Image (cartoon, helix red, strand yellow):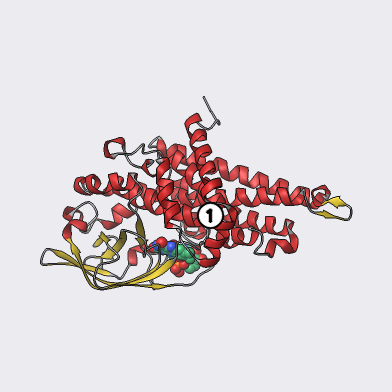
């Protein structure tokens, strides 16, 4: 048996260059401002492309460096340590667009779109959730029909993060009778500027910067060529959605969780060694020492779960259970760690002059979005084939 826990050298080098980028282009004060103003810094996203990191899910034949899930997660982790605004738009390009196009795009879609993505010029927003549809995605009500060589779309998507800045909304649509739940679904790529698309704001706690929106479709027409995988894949939406890309999808939020939790524990450690109460640094009080030790232990466990699952994915091995475990554990732990870090800083943990409250707002949403913790437990239990 051979087990190697060392990160590959090229990933460590990649982390270093992302860390330098974060230090110069994403200083702490700016990250706070983006969160406060709910602002997405387009120019920072564009400069990030200069590092070549947008090609990590794109095969070399299409101008990329990948696919390399492990390295992609390392980049997400480093970006999320400072700002979920930039981490989320990176995910919209490299993961939402990249993994889905590589997995399910037609030859024409791959040839046209993947080189753009590798240059940092392409982003997809996910149009899955709807006002009446959360975890039960196969029940989507928004509809698509073929008419005169076009696809015509009606309905509404909710929580469509970044739909206003994306090039395409990756829409899961009902494209036939409702009686067969998992059939008659299609994925269609809808440009958000198409006539009949209306995008309106949706206020929420945390993960600000790349705003989350309501999107309605009123007789929106797109070419039949925009069906993911081409016209032949009409009606195959569920198998495209529930394929390999969705398994790996769970790791993106795990990587965000790890980044946020790491930043929180690092800040708490620094704070505890500066703040003096009762004549001693608070890091000398046992309660604070134990809290930091617990946080560090949780973060270490998160790191192992995430990168083990990413490694399995890169080997092309089955990883549905491991990716669900990683999503469940990392997102729950991030919510715990950020709140513990906030308490180490006492009242200053609640102040907008520090980042503890931002980390907490970001982390608290992670067990809810992208397949809730309950849904991950269902996946894991189903794979265990527990009797029902
Ligand atoms: C900030 C933010 C960004 C988002 N971005 C996007 C996006 O870009 N694209 C997109 O499509 N969606 C997005 N979402 C939606 C998000 O993915 C959904 O919130 C999530 O899928 C869960 O749906 P729901 O909240 O409607 O919960 P529901 O599915 O209504 O569930 C409500 C509660 O019931 C539980 N529950 C439901 N079914 C079961 C079951 N079978 N077993 C056990 N428990 C169950 C859930 O765990 C949850 O606790 C975003 C949401 C937020 C808040």
Residue at (51% x, 44% y) in the render: 21
The answer to whether 167 appears left or right of 6 in the picture is left
For the view shown, which residue lies furthest in the right direction? 279
The answer to whether 360 appears left or right of 384 in the picture is right
For the view shown, which residue lies furthest in the top direction? 1
Q: Quadrant of ligand 1?
A: bottom left
For the view shown, which residue lies furthest in the left direction? 148
* Picture coordinates of residue 160, whole percent (x, y): 39, 65
Residue at (60% x, 51% y) in the render: 261
Foreground pick, 9 / 289:
9
Foreground pick, 53 / 57:
53
Badge count: 1
Residue at (27% x, 36% y) in the render: 61
Question: What residue is pinned by disc 1?
Answer: 83
The answer to whether 122 appears left or right of 228 in the picture is right
* Picture coordinates of residue 370, whole percent (x, y): 45, 58
Above or below, 178 against 225 in this view is below
* Picture coordinates of residue 356, whole percent (x, y): 65, 58
Q: Secondary structure at mark 1?
A: loop
Above or below, 243 against 349 in this view is above
Q: Using a 10 Å C-alpha cutoff, classify the residue at mark 1 as few (fewer than 14 neighbours), some (14 to 19) or many (20 or more).
A: many
Quick check: can you spot residue 329?
Answer: no
Foreground pick, 55 / 216:
55
């Amino acid at each position: 048996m051979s087990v190697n826990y060392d990160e590959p050298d090229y990933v460590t080098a990649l982390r270093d260059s992302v860390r330098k980028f974060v230090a110069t282009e994403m200083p702490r004060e700016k990250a706070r401002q983006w969160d406060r103003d709910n602002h997405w810094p387009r120019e920072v996203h564009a400069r990030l492309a200069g590092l070549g990191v947008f090609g990590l899910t794109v095969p070399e034949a299409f101008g990329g460096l990948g696919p390399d899930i492990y390295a992609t997660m390392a980049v997400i982790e480093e970006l999320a340590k400072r700002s979920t605004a930039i981490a989320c738009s990176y995910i919209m390009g490299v993961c939402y667009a990249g993994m889905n196009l590589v997995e399910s795009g037609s030859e024409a879609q791959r040839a046209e779109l993947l080189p753009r993505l590798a240059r940092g010029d392409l982003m997809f927003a996910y149009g899955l959730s709807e006002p009446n549809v959360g975890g039960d995605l196969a029940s989507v009500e928004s509809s698509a029909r073929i008419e005169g060589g076009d696809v015509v779309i009606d309905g509404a998507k909710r929580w469509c993060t970044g739909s206003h800045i994306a090039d395409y909304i990756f829409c899961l649509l009902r494209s036939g009778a409702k009686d067969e739940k998992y059939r008659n679904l299609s994925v269609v790529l809808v440009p958000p500027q198409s006539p009949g698309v209306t995008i309106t704001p949706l206020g929420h706690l945390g993960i600000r910067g790349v705003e989350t929106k309501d999107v309605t479709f009123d007789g929106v027409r797109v070419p039949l060529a925009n069906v993911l995988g081409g016209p032949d894949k009409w009606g195959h939406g569920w198998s495209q959605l529930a394929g390999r890309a969705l398994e790996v999808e769970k790791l993106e939020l795990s990587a965000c969780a790890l980044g946020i939790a790491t930043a929180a524990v690092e800040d708490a450690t620094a704070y505890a060694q500066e703040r003096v109460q009762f004549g001693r640094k608070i890091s000398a009080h046992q309660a604070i020492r134990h809290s930091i030790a617990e946080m560090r232990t949780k973060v270490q466990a998160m790191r192992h779960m995430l990168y083990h699952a990413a490694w399995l994915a890169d080997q092309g091995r089955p990883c549905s259970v491991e990716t669900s475990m990683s999503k469940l554990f990392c997102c729950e732990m991030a919510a715990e760690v950020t709140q513990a870090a906030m308490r180490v800083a006492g009242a200053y943990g609640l102040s907008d002059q520090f980042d503890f409250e931002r980390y907490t707002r970001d982390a608290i949403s992670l067990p809810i979005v992208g397949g809730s913790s309950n849904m991950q437990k269902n996946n894991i239990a189903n794979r265990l084939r527990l009797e029902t």
